[in-house]
Image (spheres, rainbow, N blue to C red):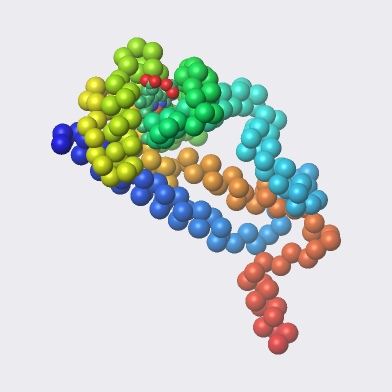
Amino acid sequence: MGIWTAFYALSFYLATLILIGGLAYKIYQYAKTPAPLKVPTMPAPLTTSGVVLRVLSEVVLFRSLFRANKWIWLFGMMFHGALWVVLLRHLRYFTEPVWSWVVLVQPFGKYGGFVMLIGLLGLLARRIFVERIRYISNPSDYLMLILLLVIGGSGVMMSFVLPTDIVQFKAFMLGVMYFDWQAIPTDSILLVHLAAVILLMIIFPISKLLHAPGVFFSPGRNQVDNSREKRHIAPWALKLETKESS
Ligand code: HEM
């Protein structure tokens, strides 16, 4: 058993535990955080199904970003849209036999890597060249973009310039999943790609990338505009009210 195999296999286990445990904890925290006031961003939907549509249009189409800034919307869409296709293409490393729809996605995912990189470079350029954005950018804003660029860049390099031994790599990945370890190919570009992915998995639950689950809990977006029809009482106020009336 090579040292790289053991190192990457163990790191994958640790990163998966941190990612799933950390995300579950964060989502629990978001769900438990009180939203004492009715504060939907107006104009807001009047019904629950309207709210579902509103949140979906935010998540799928980035609707308010589109209204706010077309360039950021375009680069954001390119990155997130391509990311989905690339990740769906990746399912072939974790499944045997590979599902037929994953086979269909392959060419889109392969070239999607470039779209993802262009989107990321656009978002990075915005942080560097737009003064207002540069002023509010922290080191972590740049580092997240750079980490994603390293992942995307090394992935595209493997797909187009320095191919790795995909058959051996898939054996390693399936071995990690089924606790039957197989040797990992040791070309540096693959090791860089995987190390960056492992780092991303570990920092995800403490990073700005939490906006992904967080958007569903945004009171400005997920509340119904029904304050005239229904009295909104925060849970703590309800407790006081029932105490007083008893
Ligand atoms: C456990 C997770 C991951 C594994 C095992 C993995 C593995 C790989 C491998 C082996 C390739 C080369 C494909 C080929 O030669 O045909 C690749 C390509 C690529 N990876 Fe990953 N990767 C992972 C996660 C990610 C993530 C999270 C991203 C994006 C943030 C990403 C972005 C890419 C891109 C853009 C490419 C090039 C396009 C493609 O061939 O799909 N990867 N990845």
Q: In which quarter of the image is residue 194?
A: top left
Percent position of residue 243, x then y: 67, 83
The one of 7 and 122 positioned closer to us in this rendering: 7
- Residue at image position (39%, 17%) is 159
State left or right for residue 24 relative to residue 73.
Answer: left
Percent position of residue 39, x then y: 70, 53
Residue 136 appears in view? yes
Percent position of residue 183, x then y: 22, 32
In this view, which residue lies farthest toward the front? 97
- Residue at image position (32%, 35%) is 173
- Residue at image position (24%, 35%) is 182
Q: Quadrant of residue 67?
A: top right
The one of 65 and 107 positioned closer to us in this rendering: 107
State left or right for residue 65 relative to residue 214.
Answer: right
Q: Is residue 95 above or below residue 44?
A: above
Instruction: Name the image quarter holding the C terminus.
Output: bottom right
Residue 153 appears in view? no
Percent position of residue 210, x then y: 49, 44
Give the image quadrant in which the ligand numbered 1 is located.
top left
